[in-house]
Amino acid sequence: MARLVIVSNRVPSPREVTQAAGGLTVGLADAIRGQPSLWFGWSGGTDGVDGTDPAPGITVQDNVTYATIPLSERQLKGFYQGFSNGILWPVCHYRVGLMNYSRDELETYLEVNRLYARALAPLLQPDDTIWVQDYQLFPLGEALRAEGVNARIGFFLHIPFPPEQLFRAMPGADLLLRDLAAYDLIGVQTEQDAGNLRGALRAVGVERPVGAFPIGIDPESFARQAARGENTREMGRFLDALGGRSLILGVDRLDYSKGIPERFRGFDRLLKRFPEHRNKVSFLQIAPVSRGDVAEYQALRRELDELAGRINGEWAEIDWLPLRYITRPISRKVLASVHRHAQIGLVTPLRDGMNLVAKEYVAAQNPADPGVLILSRFAGAAPELGDALLVNPLDPDEIAEALDQALRMGRDERVTRWTGMNTAIHAATAASWAADFLRALGETPDPRGAVA
Ligand code: ADQ
C-alpha cells in the first residue's frame, strides 16, 4: 500500500498523535491512521554535529514510522530562531519592519533543508506521497528533487502569504519562490493567501497549482472536552473568583501577530467609554510565553506587563480585578471549559493564517446559551466565521463598541450567530482539511510522467 510521508519541523510523539489535541496534529493524525505512514522532522535535540549527517532515530508505532534527526546548536539558531522565526514569520505576517535579516541565517536555513532532504531521501519508497508542512521548509521539495526524489510532493503553508511586493522585500525571497516550483501542489489557508502567492510566483516566472485549504478543528471532541471540564475543582475556584461577572476571554501564544496589546487597549476603552460595564465584567487573557529567546517577543512581553499593570491600576476596585493575565500554559481540559463559560471570545490577530482558537471558542459553547465571538477581520478564519462580530483590531474604539454590543446581545441573536458559525466549523474540520489536500495532490499529474 502506498505510504503517506509527512514532514514537519516538529514531529509529535506517538502519544500526541493518539490523543491529538491541536488542529494540525488532529488533521494529520486522521490522515495517517488510514494508511502506512512515515513522519519525518527534527528530534528536538541539539546534539547534531556541524559537518556530519546524523543517522535518523526511528520509532515505529501502529502503522506509523517516526524518523527524526537532531540539529547542532548553530543550525537550530540560524534555521529556526533566526531565519524561520526572526525573518520569515514577520514578513509573512506583513511586518517587514520587524524582520532581522541576516544572510548567514538564510544560508543556515537552506543548509538545514538540504540536511533534512539527505536524511529523508534514503527512507523513501517509490510509491510514497510526500506532504511538507509550513514555513520552516519552503526549500525542502527542491532539496528532495536534487536528491533524485520523483514522488508527488505537496506543500502546505500554515501562516499567511503576504502580497508579492511585501514578500519580495525579503532578501532571498525569489530563491524561496523558485524552490516552490518543485512541489506538485501548494496549499494555503485562504483565497487571499492563494491570490498573493500566485502573484509572487508569477513575478518570478513559476507556474504551479496553488489552492486554499482552510484548516479546522475536531469540533465534537473539543465540545465534549468543554462540557467535561466543567465540574473540575479548578473551574469551581475560577467561577467563585469571577463572582457572577461576565467573562471576556483571550487565548493565544504570546506572539506579536495575535494583537494582544490592541485587545488590552480595546478593553481599556470599553471601561472608559461604557462605565455601565465597570465591575460587571472581567477579562481573562491566557498567553503562554512562546519564542522567549527572540528579542521582539521579549519586547512584547514587557509591553503587556506594563499595559496590564496600568489597566488594573486605573480601573480595579478592592473587590474587582478587571484583567487577569496569565503567561503560563493551562491544561486543555480546563481551557476548553473556560471557553464555554466565556460570554465573549475576543480574538484579535493583526494577521493570522487561520486561528484555531476562534473555532475552538465556537465549538465549546453551550448551544442553548452561547457566547459571542469577536473576531479580527485579519484572521484567516474571518471569511468562514462571518457571523462573528468582525473588527479591525487597530481601532480600540471598534473593539470597545463590539464588546459593548456583545455584552448587551440578546439570546436569540446569539443563538442565530452561533448556529451559523457552528455549521461552518463542522463543514471544514481538521480531518476534511487533510483529506481534501491529499485528494487534490493525488489528482495532480504524476511527476514521473505517464506510468502504466
Ligand atoms: P498558531 O499560531 O499556534 O498556529 P492557532 O491556530 O490559534 O495559532 O492555535 C494553535 C493551537 O494552540 C490551538 O489549538 C490552541 O488551543 C492552542 N493554544 C493557543 N493558545 C493556548 C494557550 N494559551 N493555552 C493552551 N493552548 C493554547 C499556526 C498558525 C495559525 C494556524 C495554525 C494551524 O499561526 O494561523 O491556524 O498554525 O494551521
Image (cartoon, rainbow, N blue to C red):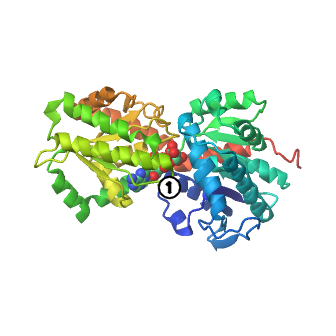
Would residue 367 be seen by someone viewing this image from the given angle?
no
Residue at left offset 47%, top offset 32%: 378
Q: Is residue 40 left or right of residue 256?
A: right
Residue type beneath disc 1: Asp
The front one of 411 and 192 is: 192
Q: Quadrant of the N terminus?
A: bottom right
Residue at left offset 21%, top offset 44%: 312
Residue at left offset 78%, top offset 51%: 143
Residue 445 appears at what percent x and percent y?
Answer: 80, 41
| Total tally of numbered discs in the picture | 1
* Dot 1 crowding, Cα within 10 Å, few <14, some 14–19, many 20+: few
Would residue 355 be seen by someone viewing this image from the given angle?
yes
Residue 149 appears at what percent x and percent y?
Answer: 82, 54
* Residue 71, image quadrant: bottom right
Q: Which residue is mark 1?
A: 293
Q: Is mark 1 within 8 Å of ligand 1?
A: no
Residue at left offset 59%, top offset 40%: 213
Disc 1 secondary structure class:
loop
Residue 125 appears at what percent x and percent y?
Answer: 80, 62
Residue 377 appears at what percent x and percent y?
Answer: 44, 30
Q: Is residue 366 left or right of residue 70?
A: left
The front one of 114 and 133 is: 114
Q: Is residue 407 left or right of residue 165?
A: left
